[in-house]
Image (cartoon, coloured by chain):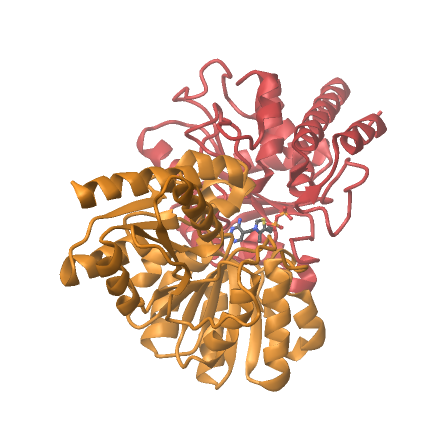
Amino acid sequence: MSDKDMREVYTDTLIELAESNDKICLMEADLMRATGTNPFKEKFPERTFNVGVAEANMVGVASGLSAGGKIPFAATFGCFAARRTFDQFFISANYAQQNVKLVGTDPGVSAGFNGGTHMPFEDIGLMRTIPKLVIFEASDTVSLKKLLPQAAEHKGSTYMRLQRKGKNTHYSESDEIILGKGNVLKEGSDVTIIATGYVMVPEAIAAAEILSEEGINATVIDMHTIKPLDKDLILKYAEKTGALVVCENHQKSCGLFAAVSELLAEERPTPVQAVAVEDLFGQVGTPAFLQGAYGLTKENIVEKTKIVLERKNG
Amino acid sequence: MLNDDLKDLEKKAKEIRIKTIDAIGFLGVGHIGGAMSIVELLTILYYSKMHIDPKIPKMEDRDKLVLSKGHAGPALYSTLAQKGFFPVEWLHTLNQGGTKLPSHCDMNMTPGIDMTTGSLGQGLSSAIGLALAMRIDKIDRNVFAIIGDGESQEGQNWEAAMAAPQFKLNKLIAFTDYNKMQIDGYTCDIMPIDDLVEKWSAFGWSTYRVNGHNFAELDKAIDDARKSKDKPSMIIMDTIKGKGCSFAEGQLTNHNMVFTYEQAKEAIAALG
Ligand SMILES: Cc1ncc(C[n+]2csc(CCOP(=O)(O)OP(=O)(O)O)c2C)c(N)n1
């Protein structure tokens, strides 16, 4: 456990970046209190812009800031970041080859009490359709701290899903975490569990422990970067283990499972199962209730692992 | 408005406040500020103005309401429960997994909710659509819509602002809950929206400005708006965010507040 929430890490890291790079700007759309970026504003008031409840304008302005040579980080809830601003992000930011770092907070079930209108299960899917966009979600505080500077460094727009609350830490400071490369958290020869994001990576680690007690050895990969996809790593483990389970706090049809399946279909057909949202809208409830309701649990990972192993051996 | 009617509305409003504070307090967190500021409006609409039947929530020939600032749902749920649209006990299921009362209004879950909202800025357009559909079907009723002042920063509101006069939607009566606050601070500091009367008038709406906690003023403005021959109406209500909830009223932090059931009970007691 870190002593800081994910959102504090986000803010502190941006402050560090902004201290050495005067191009870094911050944007909010009346959710500064939620994202927790007030300390950035206090330090760099002249580089902080809150547009009010106007997400499309935020992304449009961010694109202009970029065209003027700045590097804006713009945040709102993921549902609005992806859906409300999609055309602005597509055209003014990406098609125009600008450098907008869009941040969608409260991914998937972490939207909790805000309910179905606020629960992005499709943001990765929407974003995947944008050519050359970099898409990622950190699974803990350490990887968030390490990935953010790389996103700032990257020449081009990025979309980051950001869990705001929680202090999960499974990496150590010395671990190497590189944007665009998956991290193997555990080696195993029977099956590969690929997970992305703050909610599913810990579930995958826990599922692998349950499986190992049952004599099944799983590789666990944190695929923080969904695009560009670390194809080599996936193909390597598809060959090594012959079966995969892909876990995401997201719609099955268009996220990481879809990306992995597309790769496998073309390069190396291998049995693969999803632990993901099965064509459903979001709903209201505690994150724990929602994880259960959508099957985003270690138990379901174990179950899907057994199914994929039957397919592999059958 | 008669004195007795006024007294009755005040009593009803107090009961709705109590239910709302109780429901959110029972859960321990929620949008108390923006719920409290529209209690008088909901009271007068549901107890004096709207043609509705709690036994037939989907009655075709009814007035409709779009609560575009959908996060104020708990105030509307308390009103609907009190009117008998569903059992009052449901209020304690607010936001629990499997509830019919989600934080933001959902027309497919809750009897009496006419439009799904929660993504700010969309409700006024939906209200225009509802009013157009009524006109096609020759249903001579009103569509009411409530938007927030922070919400007014969404550009879509101003697209809707152009469309309603163009379509001559005299049956559309919208309200701005001008409580001067949004999440990050005072609306005038974050992104000023003044002058609302001039703005809506310039877009072609009949525009009124009232004290949103004063029944007599609300009553008169709504009745005047209903007489409109060819223009939509916008009633700008000066309100206080958190009104009537002792620990929340006027607090900049009252948007989505964490509080205990004990605090809720104290606030209810303070209402007298
Ligand atoms: C499109 C969209 N952006 C952001 C939000 C998150 N949000 C919920 S309420 C709110 C502030 C709304 O302020 P206002 O309309 O003044 O509401 P009130 O103060 O009356 O509660 C925000 C930004 C949202 N629900 N929808």
- Which quarter shows the N terminus of chain B? top right
Q: Nearer the viewer, residue B97 or B143?
A: B97
Q: Is residue B69 above or below residue A179?
A: above
Q: Is residue B179 visible?
A: yes
Q: Is residue A278 visible?
A: no
- Which quarter shows the C terminus of chain B? top right
- Who's the residue at 34% across and 78% down the image? A96
The reply, left or right, for residue B46 in relation to residue A254 is right
- Who's the residue at 46% across and 34% down the image? B106
Q: Is residue B99 above or below residue A168?
A: above
| Image location (x, y in percent) of residue A211 | 39, 42
The reply, left or right, for residue B29 in relation to residue A175 is right
Q: Please count the marks in the image.
A: 0
Q: Nearer the viewer, residue A24 or A296?
A: A296
| Image location (x, y in percent) of residue A249 | 41, 48
- Who's the residue at 64% across and 34% down the image? B41
| Image location (x, y in percent) of residue A235 | 24, 63
Query: Drawn colour of chain A?
Result: orange
The reply, left or right, for residue A194 in relation to residue B255 is left
Q: Is residue B178 above or below residue A162?
A: above
- Which quadrant holds residue A197? bottom left
| Image location (x, y in percent) of residue B92 | 62, 24
Q: Nearer the viewer, residue B167 or B265?
A: B265
Query: Drawn colour of chain B?
Result: red
